[in-house]
Amino acid sequence: MLELAARFAQRGPLRVLDGGNRFNAYSVARQLRRAGTQDQTTVLSRIRVARAFTCHQVLSLLENTALEPHPALGIDLLDTFYDESVDVGERRRLALKCAAHLRRLSQLAVVVVSVRPPRPPSTDPTGILQIMQEAADQFVFHEPPAPAQIPLLL
């Protein structure tokens, strides 16, 4: 996602909606340097980052994001929805509203969102992954590489 942020920012303004507190401007700058970008400061200044630390803040962030013809990246946008201190029904209600706002934002520009399933042994009782799949025009599931089998030495 950070490589994608660098590519989008080279072309113009970019909105980054960070739900997992994972946006790292230094990593984006490294990507720009690898790509041979001469004026990294100008490219980085095109990126507007907004962070949310609760599922309620994610919804507020999306509600207050204006409809503009600039791409948007949602990085780990739904990580906060796995907070078990928030009622399951409330998390589902918020996720449905967030999906509607993501569809709204995608009317004028590309919107790319990364989401992760809950960490094992947790499950997804809210069905937010399903909600996001149904809201998306295109959905890509990335399987992490399987760990290499190390033979047992006897």
Image (cartoon, rainbow, N blue to C red):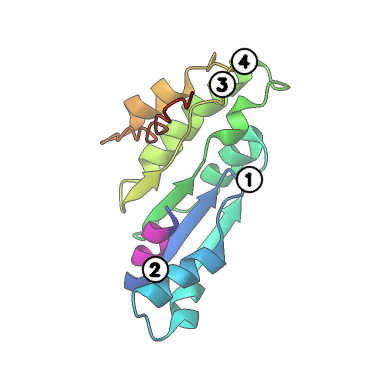
**Which numbered disc, 2 or 3, marks the residue closer to the eye?**
3
In space, the residues marked 4 and 3 are separated at their CA atoms by 18 Å
Please give the label number shown on residue 9. 2
- The residue indicated by pointer 1 is 52
Task: Confirm or deny contact between disc 2 and disc 4 (CB under 8 A).
Answer: no
**Amino acid identity at mark 2:** Ala
Judged from the image, the secondary structure of the residue bearing numbered disc 3 is loop
Locate residue 88, reporting x and y percent: 62, 15
Q: Earlier in the sequence, mark 2 or mark 3?
A: 2
Q: Give the image location of residue 126, x and y in percent.
A: 53, 17
Q: Residue 88 carries which label?
A: 4
Three-letter residue code for mark 4: Val
Q: Which of marks 3 and 1 is nearer the N terminus?
A: 1
Numbered disc 4: secondary structure: helix
Q: Name the residue under label 3.
A: 120
Q: Give the CA separation, mark 2 to mark 3.
A: 34 Å
The earlier-in-sequence mark between 2 and 4 is: 2
What residue appears at the point 41 percent right and 54 percent down from the top-left corner?
Answer: 72
